[in-house]
Amino acid sequence: MTAPLNHDNRALQPALEVCGLSRSFSVGGGLLRQGKILRAVDDINLSVRRGESLGIVGESGSGKTTLSRMMLGLMKPTNGVIKIDGRNIANIDRLELARKIQPIFQDPYSSLNPRKTIGQIIRLPLEAHGIGTSKDRDEAIEQIMEQVGLPLRLQHSYPSQLSGGQRQRVAIARALVVKPEILICDEPTSALDVSVQAQILNLLTDLRAAFNLTYIFITHDLGVLDYMADRVAVMYMGRIVELGPARKILAAPDHPYAQALLSSILTPDPHLDLPDLSLAQGFPDPLNPPTGCSFHPRCAKARDICCTKPPPVTRAQDHLIECHLHPLELHP
C-alpha cells in the first residue's frame, strides 16, 4: 500500500492571523461603582503573509502597542483569536511561541539588562531555550553579532558603553539568535538619531532578505513605512480604518484620517509653514467614544450619517476601508 503524500500546507498559510481581536479595560472602577470600559483594540481582523512587511500606523492611543503585545502573547485578548502558522497562540507553549515571534522595542537601552555584558545578553535566549552546547552558543553569538554589524570585541562590553545604534543592534541580535520567523518592531528607530535610523532600517531590510523574516512594523512615522512596508494598516481608536498596499496608502489614501496623517509629514522646504493636519479637534476620549464613525468629530468631510451610524467595512482586492465617504466594491 502506498503511503499518503505528506503535503506541507505551511507555505500556503499566513504567517500570522488576527481574527475578531478585541481588548477592553475597565477604568476608574471602585468598590461601589463600576468602571468605564476602554476598548483599546476593537474587532481587528488581519492577515500577514509569510515574508511580508506590514506597517501599522496611527497616533498615540490608537491601539498599536496593545495589538502588538497581544500578538506577542504578552497580553490576553478579551475576544478573538491570534494564529501563527494556523495555530492559536493560546495553545502554544510560551517558549515555543518565543521561538516563532520576537519583539524589537523602541528604547534599546531600557530593554537591555545594564548588569549583563553584550555576550551574556545575546546568550540568554539560547540558554532559556536550551539550544546547543556552550560551544554552539559561542559560535551562534559570534555569527549573529557579525550579521548585525557588531564588532566581536563588544562581547565583553556593557550597554552603557555602547552608542544608541549599537544597543539597537544588540536588541536585534538577541531577537534573531533563536531564529524566529516573525519580528514585531515597535518604533525601533524613534529613539535614535536620524543618521543612525537609516543604518538600522537598512540592516533590518538586509536581515529580512537573509532570513526570510516576516515583519510587523508599529510606528507613527510614515517615512519609515514608505521605506520598510509592503502593506500599511491605519489604526484609529482601536480599529483598522484603512488597509492596503503601502504604495497606494502612502500616495493616495482614501480615509480622511489617513489623508490627515499623510499631510502631517514635514517638508524639507524651509519656506513652507508647518503642515495643517485638517483635524477639527484633538484625539477623542476613548472612555466616551463618539457615536457613529469615531473619527467624525475631527473630520472636515463628515456628513450626518457619519455622526449616527458606524461606517461599513468594505474591500476591493487588497484594499480595505471603513468609511461612509469612500465605500469600496464589497467582496465576500
Image (spheres, rainbow, N blue to C red):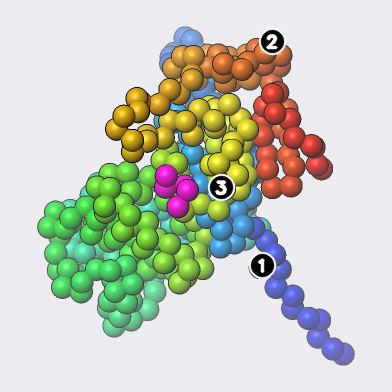
Task: Work out whether residue 206 or residue 143 is closer to the camera in this orientation and state it.
Answer: 206
Residue that badge 1 annotates: 10
- Rounded to the nearest angstrom, the CA distance separating label 2 from label 1 is 47 Å
Amino acid type for the residue under numbered disc 2: Asp
Classify 93 as above or below 45.
below
* Side (left or right) of 305 relative to 188: right
Q: Position of residue 185 (x, y in %)?
A: 42, 51
Is residue 304 visible in this depiction of the protein?
Answer: yes
Which of marks 3 and 1 precedes in the sequence? Answer: 1
- CB of mark 2 within 8 Å of CB of mark 1? no
Task: Work out whether residue 267 or residue 1 is closer to the camera in this orientation and state it.
Answer: 267
- Rounded to the nearest angstrom, the CA distance separating label 3 from label 2 is 31 Å
* Side (left or right) of 265 relative to 286: left
Task: Work out whether residue 81 or residue 267 is closer to the camera in this orientation and state it.
Answer: 267
Classify 267 as above or below 89.
above
Q: Position of residue 176 (x, y in %)?
A: 39, 65
Classify mark 2: helix, strand or loop: helix
Which of marks 2 and 3 precedes in the sequence? Answer: 3
- CB of mark 3 within 8 Å of CB of mark 2? no
Which residue is at a point 60% across and 53% down the rendered structure image?
48
Which of marks 1 and 2 precedes in the sequence? Answer: 1
The circle on residue 278 is none
Which residue is at a point 63% across and 15% down the rendered structure image?
302
Amino acid type for the residue under numbered disc 3: Ala
The circle on residue 304 is 2
Q: Which residues are magenta?
A: 223-227
Instruction: Assess disc 2: are there few (<14), some (14-19) or many (≥20) residues with their C-alpha within 10 Å of its C-alpha.
Output: few
Classify 252 as above or below 177.
above
Is residue 94 visible in this depiction of the protein?
Answer: no
